[in-house]
Amino acid sequence: MRRGRPDPEIPMPGSTLDFWRVEQYIPHKRLLLRAEMKMPGRAWLEFLANSDGASTTLHQTAQFEPRGFAGLLYWYLLWPVHQVIFRGMLRRIAATTRGMADSDDAAA
């Protein structure tokens, strides 16, 4: 049974985000998610934010630990699909944060 998120804005360790479980959250630095989907292996998605004060660079890393031949087959067959999904995810994050910055500038 899913517990959900006690706070919709803060991804607390142990809470869920869609099909992911939050393993670690360091505000403005790191978000590590573990996949809770049925698959032949274990998967993690990590976001690292590096800020120089004027801008922030977001690094996204997907890791997969395959279980046997089925896991390897799964990873390599879905690799092109994952590329599209993860790129789209980063574009949506960038668009959202740009929109947030624009609204902050307008409020100032």
Image: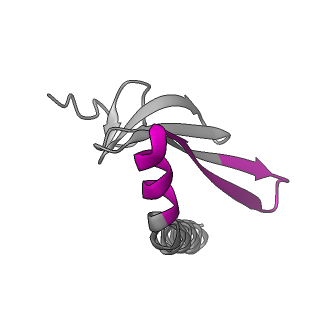
- Is 59 one of the magenta-colored residues? yes
Check the picture and name the quadrant holding the C terminus: bottom right
Kindly give the residue lying farthest to the top in the view shown: 14
User: Which is nearer the eye, 15 or 9?
Assistant: 15
Seen in the image, is 68 located left or right of residue 6? right
Give how far across and how far down residue 74 sits, in percent: 42, 56
Q: Looking at this view, name the residue that lies furthest to the right.
A: 52
Relative vertical location of residue 26 with respect to residue 63 in this rendering, above or below: above
Answer with the quarter of the image where residue 106 lies: bottom right
Instruction: Give the image location of residue 77, x and y in percent.
Output: 46, 66
- Residue in view at x 50 percent, y 51 percent: 72
Q: Which of these two is toward me, 47 or 11?
A: 47
Residue 31 spot, x, y in % from top left: 56, 39
The residue located at (32%, 38%) in the rendering is 36
| Quadrant (top left, top right, bottom left, bottom right) of the N terminus | top left
* Residue 56 within the magenta-colored segment of the rendering: yes
- 20 relative to 23 in the view: left or right: left
**How many marks overall?**
0
Q: Is residue 3 left or right of residue 69?
A: left
What colouring does the structure picture have? one colour
Is residue 15 shown above or below 43?
A: above
Image coordinates for residue 73, horizontal then vertical, percent:
46, 56
At x 28% / y 29%, what residue is drawn?
A: 6
Q: Which residues are magenta?
A: 48-76
In this view, 82 is above or below 34 = below
Which residue is pictured at 42% across the width and 28% down the height? 12
Task: Name the side, left or right, on which 103 lies relative to 4.
Answer: right
